[in-house]
Amino acid sequence: MSFGRRDFLRLTAYSVGAFAVLGTANIARAETPVRPPGAIAESDFLSLCLRCGRCIDACPEHVLRRATLTEGGLAGLNTPVLTQGCTLCLDCTKECPVEALLPIAESEARMGRIVVDSELCVGCWLCVRECPHEALVRNNETRVVEVDLNKCVGCGICIPVCPAEENALSLSPEGAHRPRLRG
């Protein structure tokens, strides 16, 4: 049996169709990533962001990177994502040419919040000492760190100090303050 041009085209069409059905299912379930400080509301952010990478290049801590398909879906591909350790220098907001990241005061920054996995937390308290916002609190009874949601800005500075075999701390976009554009 020979494999001709027609067979090749048919196989290509089936492959594209399979990606369209299966690939977009995963893309549609993509979670909203944690954005840099000063990010506007997600729908406005996605329509304005040029994916130029100037904010990523401006970050002195190198804690911004480009979003993948699983983080922001096709619409969010290559947009900036905060991974951990933002010191709120706000250099990224100064570099955005289209105001997808707005210049803000450090006190206004709220990228999301830290989530503690109680199954993974070893109760070492290193993250409590590292948190610059005093948002992590020791629970001496459970030996699990708790998050004060009124103080946590989602900077992720606590994440790299977690000694657990699998990190007990992660960033969530929940609780982020992201203004909508007027109009």
Image: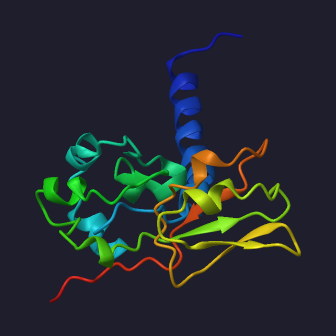
- Residue at the image point whose x is 31% and y is 77% from the top: 107
The C terminus - image quarter: bottom left
Residue 145 or 84: which is nearer the viewer?
Answer: 145
Residue found at the far right of this picture: 141
The N terminus - image quarter: top right
- Residue at the image point whose x is 84% and y is 67% from the top: 143
Residue 26 or 61: which is nearer the viewer?
Answer: 61
Residue 19 or 97: which is nearer the viewer?
Answer: 97
Which of the 4 quarters of the picture holds residue 94?
Answer: bottom left
Which of the 4 quarters of the picture holds residue 97?
Answer: bottom left
Q: How many marks?
A: 0
Residue 11 or 60: which is nearer the viewer?
Answer: 60
Q: Is residue 168 left or right of residue 79?
A: right
Where residue 171 appears, as percent x and y from the top left, is 56, 61
Where residue 22 appears, as percent x and y from the top left, is 63, 51
Where residue 62 appears, as percent x and y from the top left, is 37, 40
| Residue 53 in sight | no
- Residue at the image point whose x is 68% and y is 49% from the top: 162
Where residue 141 appears, as percent x and y from the top left, is 88, 75
Residue found at the far bottom of this picture: 183
Tell me: residue 113, above or below residue 71.
below
Q: Is residue 167 left or right of residue 72?
A: right
- Residue at the image point whose x is 34% and y is 52% from the top: 79
Q: Is residue 140 left or right of residue 91?
A: right
| Residue 42 in sight | yes
